Structure formats: C-alpha cells, structure tokens
Image (cartoon, helix red, strand yellow):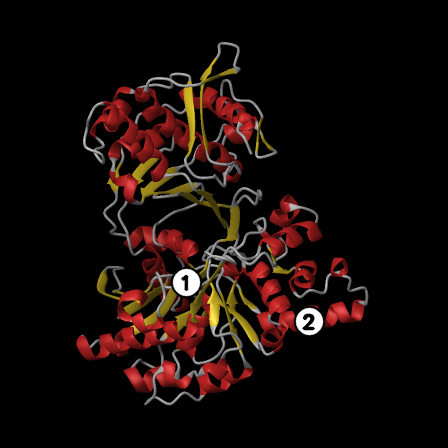
Amino acid sequence: MSFLGLDLSTQQLKLLVTNEQLEVTNSYAIEFEKHLPHYNTTKGVYTNEETGSVVAPVVMWLEALDMILEQMKKDDDFDFASVKGISGSCQQHGSVYVSSKFHTALEKASSDKSFKESLTEECFALQTAPNWQDHSTGEEIKIFEDYIGGKEELAKVTGSRAHYRFTGTQIRKIAKDHPKEYANTDRIQLVSSFLASLFIGKVANLEEADATGMNLYDVPNRKWSEELLATCSLSHEKDGVTDESERAKAVESLKQKLGDVTPVGYDNIGSVSPYLVKRYGFSPDCKVYAFTGDNLATILSLPLNQDELLISLGTSTTVLLVTKTYAPSSNYHLFIHPTIPDAYMGMICYCNGSLAREKVRDVLNEKYHKPHADWTLFDELLEKSTSFDNKLGVYFPLGEIVPNRRAQTLRATLNSDGSIKVVDSWDAEIDAPAILHSQALSCRARASPMLSIHTETVAPQCEDLEFDEKTISAINLSQRPHKVVFVGGASKNIHISRKFAEVLGAGENLRFDNPNACALGGAFKASWSVYREEGGNDDYHKYLTGKFKGGMEVVEAEDKWEQFIPGLKMLKQMEDVLEH
C-alpha cells in the first residue's frame, strides 16, 4: 500500500510516494525552467516589471503532470495499482479560469492522449494563472479594504487584510480588465482544486482551508461573504450598482463560478478517474482527498498540535502555528486548519530574515578581516550573550511587512524608567545578539494573541502593549507556546535557533530538515484520510505522532523567557518611532 503527495509550486512539480509507515519510498520532480524550457518562463513564471503582473502558463502544469507520471511508469515501472490515496498542495492564492468545455474534455479524456493533448486551449478562459508574486492589484487592494470598512474589518471576516496575491483582488482585476474572458469562465479554481480535478476527472470543489486565502470566505460563519462577492464582481453599491437585482445576479454568477466548498476533514472527493486507471494502471478504488495550499500542507508535514509553532528561518522569517483562538489581525493571516475542523493556522510573514542577519555578520567580518560568509564570530557573540542586556536593534535592509515600515536601522538602549534611548551607533559586536533578540521578540509578541490562555496570572513586568495599532493584553503576553520547531536554512545554525528558543520560552524546542514539506504534508493527509475512512478514530495529530519518524533534533536552550519581558515594551517603543 502506498500514498502519493504532490506539490505544484512556482518552480516545479514534486511528487512523493510514502508507505504505511509514512516513510518516503520514491521522489520525483519536474523543474519547469529546466525540463520544460520551451515555455520560456523565468523561475516558472512570466513577469511584467512595468505592470507588476506575474503569471504562469496553465498548459505547462499539464505537461509537467504528464511528464512526472510517464517518468514513474516508464523509468521506474512504478506500481500505480498499489496507491491507496492521493492528496497534495499547491501554490496558494493562484487561480485557474476554466471554460465549460473543460468539464467535457476532462470527463471524456482518452487514455491514449496526454493531459496536454486532451485539455486544449479552448478549455481555458484564460491561458495563464496569476501567481502569488503578482503585484498588479494595488487598486483592488484599496477597494477591498475600503468597501468593507478597513483592513481590520476585512481581516475579521476573512482572516487576512487585502493582499496583491489574494484571489479576490485578482478576480476583480480580471473581471474589470478582461470582461469577455471572465464571462467565458465557467469555474474559477484555485491551483489546488485544479490539480485535484485532473486526478478525479471532473471539476473539484475548492478546499475550505485554501479558500480562506482568497479574501472572499467568511471564516467565522464558514460561507462566502455576500459583500465581498459583490466587491469582487464589480457589483458593490460603491461601484455605483444601485439595482439590487443586478447586484444579486452578479453575486450569484460569481458563486456559481466558485462553486461549493469542500469542508476540511478526511472525506474523499472521489476515486481516481477512469482515464488514470486505463493509462497508468491506478486501482479504481484509489481515493483522492482535497488538495490544499502549500503553507497549509507544510503544517501537516509535522505532528503539530494546538499552541505549537513552526518557525521557518529562511530569507524571510515565517511563523506558522496551530490555534483554536480566532484572533484576526491585519498583520498576520488566519486560515482554517486543513484537518482540524475547529482549529486555525496562524501565519506571520517577515521580509527581513536571513538577509538582515547576514548584513550584521558581514560588518563584523569586515571589522576583523574575516572571510565574507564566515559565521564564526557572529556565533561566538551569540554564545557570549547570556542574558538580555537592555539593548535592541531593528534591522530592516528591506521594507518590512510586520510592522509595515520602510527600510531602515534603529538601535536603542533601555533606560531605568522603562523608556528607550535611541543611539546613533554602537560597537558592531552588539548587533549580533541585538538582531536575534528583536526578531525573536517580534515573533513572540505577535504570536501571543493566537495562543490559548493557560494561565490567568500576569507574568512579572508584563503589561498591555499596543503593536500594529492593536492592544495585546498582558494576559496574552504572559502565555508561552508548548513547542517550537525550527526549519529553514538558518535553523541549521544552532546558535541562531537556540537564541530564538531562549526568547520564545517554549517547553520543547526542536529542529527539522525537510525540503519536501508540502508534498509530504499531502501524502500524510492521504494516509490519515484512508485510515479514518476505514474506521480509524485517531485525530490527525495523534495519528501522525504515532507514526512520525522524522528524526527531529533537540535544540537545548535555557529558559530565559522572563528576562526578555522588558524587551517587549522596548520593541514596541522602537517600532513607534520607526519611519513609515
């Protein structure tokens, strides 16, 4: 028995095969630029620097799936009949616009033809799909937030403020700029539901967790927001549409294009198509389970439970956490969890991660004539920094998302009365611990409203603080995560992981290497779903914990959580004086 997990990302299509013990037995990948050069993409997309448009050719994805399945069949003589379940992940927010001919072509696909041959241009209202890197929807962002009453109100309804990449703003732009193509669109699919459709041989509904990345889904009420659908379809009252019947017609049309939403859980969305059974030898009993977004699948690749964090220390820093607390903010995202019906996945994204740390390292190395990329001195300074020394630096070589500020650097010391003193400069050696402390404190502060209240006792020196124009209570700031798992390139540096762990104060700190997290999350979901449909009772976390053999490394760190409480107020004051 085996399971397939796919990941259709911006630059490649990856497929992993796992067994009943959740062990990876086979791995395949098609890199778009390398293996499909005739599409002339750059890193998998077409970019228009002038307009900010970033799109990908849909037919390239069809050919990639053809290639990967043919490779498995011809090169590996893979036993498709052994596959019991299939799921996967795809680049979040991207959308595919299919015509009515897509349905017929998919259902009647001949097993002697490839997907690319079967699904011709006329099956698609648009030949390209907007990519998450797209920056062409600035006007639409403003409209989405203004029409509903501001960014915080939009976050309250959908879990996120408006973003360039989110599907709702993209749909509105297409409806406005390409009315003919929009009218010819029979279904709007997320990339995740599009890929799932290819496996079941019919149009798959949107998966609920991934649908929360559209700025259209009313998360608290688990349904499409009528007002946001009106905004998306150019029929809002503020668009000048005063005829209620006209608005209702436009909203209903968009609802039909979006289709129903598949609730999170383990129910299959269908068996593999007769096409795949005949062409590759899949068992007709093989089930397909709803595909989800890439970030959502990442959290499925590890046994993470409520109040546990995954921190990716890459070029950017990303914090993912499992929470049952719906505490939306315009500065982070809350998605419905893909396997736990009453839970959410929080996501905080920072631009300035590794790049900012590397710039501090480079200045140090230049001062002491060390090799450019050597971390030795930086690490030694972190090791010597055994406590919070009332010094913090904010280092933004790039404009930052959280908080929303332009590129700049600010250094400060903490006065005895709790105020800060901004300093023009200090010894370069101070910057190493100062940057780690500020980065970790920002994660700690902004994750705290999403953590459960485990203690009603306010920690010493804790007080209500305002971050990003929202007050975080002293009770929230007194909570700690149960566990933190560090991933990403910089997590391999134990000194960096340890410093984050000291500030965050979790009960357990681990490090994990997994470059295939998204595909693996898909395979794990397929395995668990089959188990549940066959009568198993364990929830996702218990199932994964019982079988997981990931080989996570313990990050040994002293508990210095209380030491850094003054740093929270210090960081807040520093952010208040940063230039916008």
Q: Are marks 2 and 1 in contact (CB under 8 Å)?
A: no
Local secondary structure at mark 1: strand
Q: Quadrant of the N terminus?
A: bottom left
Decide which of 169, 92 is in the foreground and name it.
169
Q: Is residue 43 above or below residue 455?
A: below
Q: Quadrant of residue 257?
A: bottom right
| Residue 539 visible in the current orientation | no
Q: Quadrant of residue 412?
A: top left
Q: Amino acid at mark 2?
A: Glu
**Residue of label 2:** 252
Mark 2 closeness class: few <14, some 14–19, many ≥20 residues within 10 Å:
some
Which residue sits furthest front?
50
Where is residue 316 drawn, in percent x and y? 39, 43
Q: Is residue 12 left or right of residue 295?
A: left
Q: Is residue 403 above or below residue 15?
A: above
Where is residue 254 drawn, in percent x and y? 64, 70
Residue 90: mark in rendering: 1
Q: Is residue 548 left or right of residue 308?
A: left
